[in-house]
Image (cartoon, helix red, strand yellow):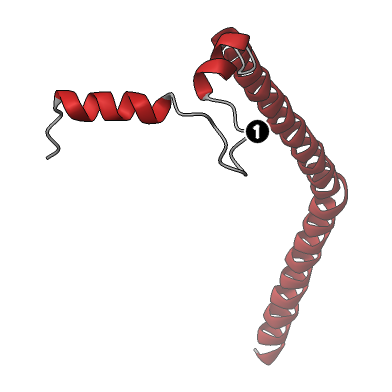
Amino acid sequence: MRVISRSSVVEESRIMSAPRNMGYMENVKPISNIIHKGEIMKVETRLGLGFAFIIILLLSVAAVGLSNIRNIQGDLDSLVNDKYPKTVWADNIADNINIISRATLNEQDFERF
């Protein structure tokens, strides 16, 4: 734990007020200057951009959802109009084959007697 004494506060203030001839640090602006000049976005601007991003994200999710619903609709149309009637026809054929086979077996049993 650091103990702050009066001499350390005076030393730090002297360091902070020293001229900035540090080479690469010459062009670095203190954060207090940036905030006061308004170079950092205001809270209202950040909130507005955040809400705009959320709305854009919501619209993109809705667009993808609608696209997928259209694809599902196309698959459902194919199922109802093409594949289901074919299964009904196949089921009718199977029923008719069973009827014919029963009739043939009954006829053969009847001929034995």
Q: In which quarter of the image is residue 9?
A: top left
The answer to which of 65 and 98 lies nearer the viewer is 65
Check disc 1 and report the residue beneath it: 27
x, y percentage for residue 75?
81, 47
Find numbered disc 1 in the image and state the secondary structure of the residue it sits on: loop
Residue located 68% across and 18% down the image: 52
Residue 39 in the image: above or below residue 113? above
* Numbered disc total: 1
- Taking the spot 78% from the left edge, 58% from the top edge, the residue there is 87
Residue 82 against residue 11 in the figure, above or below: below
Q: Nearer the viewer, residue 110 or 78?
A: 78
Q: Residue at x 87, y 45 (%)?
A: 81
- Rendering quarter of residue 73: top right
In the rendered image, the quadrant that contains the C terminus is bottom right
Q: Residue at x 62, y 35 (%)?
A: 26
The amino acid at mark 1 is: Asn
The quarter of the image holding the N terminus is top left
* Left or right of residue 106, residue 42 in this image: left
Question: In which quadrant of the rendered view does residue 22 lie?
Answer: top right
Q: Is residue 39 left or right of residue 91?
A: left
Q: Is 12 rendered above or below residue 25?
A: above
Is disc 1 surrounded by few (<14), some (14 to 19) or many (20+) residues within 10 Å?
Answer: few
Asked if 75 appears above or below 108 in the picture, the reply is above
On the image, the x and y values in percent for residue 104 come to 75, 80
